[in-house]
Image (tube, rainbow, N blue to C red):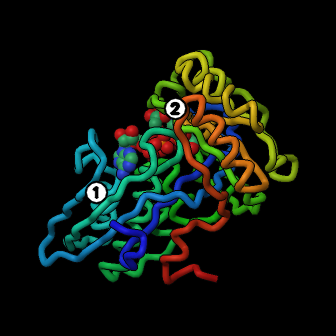
């Protein structure tokens, strides 16, 4: 798929600018406070109608069966919600690392909900799509709504915010971090006192998962240390990706190049408070 193809739908990455764990629900899920901001780095999807009820996925994502892919699961939930049996041919050009804390799977699901809502003429509003999305994962609603957000609860209670939109150098350590394993670790900090939006500085911020991830996945700690030589390095989500913010693209590129010379892989991307998906959608384009 080439980016000039007008039939392409972007599914952007996100960063967690900070992540505090403030408690735990009776069902074991953790209560969080976090800020989500999008990146202009995206997976690309294409959707074509079918004359039958088949949902077919063509994806360059080895290791994830089509029926487990959040794209197919999103399409099935959407159909179940409206009682439709419409089919689709779906193409995924996976560009974001999977399982890196960049939310690519959740973002693919959100883009699928918006695109099939349009393709199938369902006319569901954003609230309905976000409700369908939260059943797929706590991160899906923020991608459906497409606005940088302060998030609470398990990540589904969203308040739109407008942090600075810096350039980020992102390192992608060669390891997959299991979100469930991090949340099960007895050493995890679970009692950070809740803070408020006005009290929070969008420039800084701590990730409560960092010490557990450093202990379990030394390569992530090494990536944080490598990037720390150039800026304030943080973990996104439960990792494995780490990032640092820069005012200028050139500074982010210089940091990335220095890390690449030391053997790391990564990319530079711009922070966006409006999801790149909004450039594609006919709704909410105010
Ligand atoms: C913590 C975040 C921050 O963005 O991490 P990343 O996935 O982005 O790294 C996300 O909210 C993750 O959301 P998501 O990736 O959808 O997690 P899920 O699949 O719903 O949950 C995976 C497992 O993690 C644990 N879990 C997840 C979220 C949460 N608030 N509390 C939890 O305890 C649960 O054990 C759950 O079984
Ligand atoms: N479309 C998809 N893209 C990426 N991962 C997917 C997708 N569908 C299902 N998955 C599964 O979800 C897991 C988490 O994916 P992802 O959202 O990329 O990471 P994270 O939750 O760390 O931000 C992957 O390891 C993979 O097993």
Q: Is 166 situated above or below 127?
A: above
Residues packed near mark 1 inside 10 Å, few (<14), some (14 to 19) or many (20 plus): many
Q: Give the residue number, with chain letter if any, for mark 1.
A: 72
Q: Residue at x 51, y 23 (%)?
A: 184
Quadrant observed for ligand 2 in the rendered image: top left
Between the residue at mark 2 and the residue at mark 1, the CA separation in whole angstroms equals 28 Å
Q: Secondary structure at mark 2?
A: loop
- Residue 31 at least partly seen: no
Asked if labels 1 and 2 touch by Cβ distance under 8 angstroms, the answer is no
Residue 47 falls left or right of residue 140: left
Q: Residue at x 23, y 50 (%)?
A: 66
In the figure, residue 227 lies in which quadrant? top right
In the figure, residue 225 lies in which quadrant? top right
Q: Give the residue number, with chain letter if any, for mark 2.
A: 173
Q: Is 245 situated above or below 166?
A: above
Residues packed near mark 2 inside 10 Å, few (<14), some (14 to 19) or many (20 plus): many
Q: Secondary structure at mark 1?
A: helix
- Residue 128 drawn at (x, y percent): 46, 69
- Residue 222 drawn at (x, y percent): 61, 23
């Amino acid at each position: 798929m080439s980016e000039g193809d007008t039939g392409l739908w972007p599914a952007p990455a996100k960063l967690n600018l900070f992540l505090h764990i403030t408690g735990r629900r009776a069902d074991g899920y953790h209560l969080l406070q976090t800020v989500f901001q999008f990146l202009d780095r995206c997976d690309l999807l294409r959707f074509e109608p079918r004359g039958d009820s088949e949902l077919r996925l063509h994806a360059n994502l080895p290791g994830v069966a089509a029926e487990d892919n959040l794209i197919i699961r999103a399409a099935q939930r959407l159909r179940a919600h409206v009682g439709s049996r419409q089919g689709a041919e779906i193409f995924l050009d996976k560009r974001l690392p999977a399982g890196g804390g960049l939310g690519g799977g959740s973002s693919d699901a959100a883009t699928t909900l918006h695109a099939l809502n349009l393709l199938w003429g369902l006319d569901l509003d954003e609230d309905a799509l976000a409700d369908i999305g939260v059943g797929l994962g706590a991160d899906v609603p923020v991608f459906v709504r497409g606005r940088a957000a302060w998030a609470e609860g398990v990540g589904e209670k969203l308040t739109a915010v407008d942090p600075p939109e810096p350039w980020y150098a992102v390192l992608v350590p060669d390891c997959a971090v299991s979100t469930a394993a991090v949340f099960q670790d007895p050493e995890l900090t679970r009692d950070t006192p809740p803070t408020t939006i006005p009290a929070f500085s969008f420039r800084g911020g701590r990730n409560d998962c960092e010490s557990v991830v450093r202990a379990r996945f030394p390569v992530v700690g090494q990536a944080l240390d490598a990037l720390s030589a150039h800026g304030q390095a943080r973990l996104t989500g439960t990792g494995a990706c780490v990032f640092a913010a820069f005012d200028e693209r050139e500074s982010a590129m210089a940091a990335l190049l220095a890390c690449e010379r030391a053997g790391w892989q990564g990319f530079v991307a711009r922070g966006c408070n409006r999801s790149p998906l909004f450039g594609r959608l006919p709704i909410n384009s105010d």
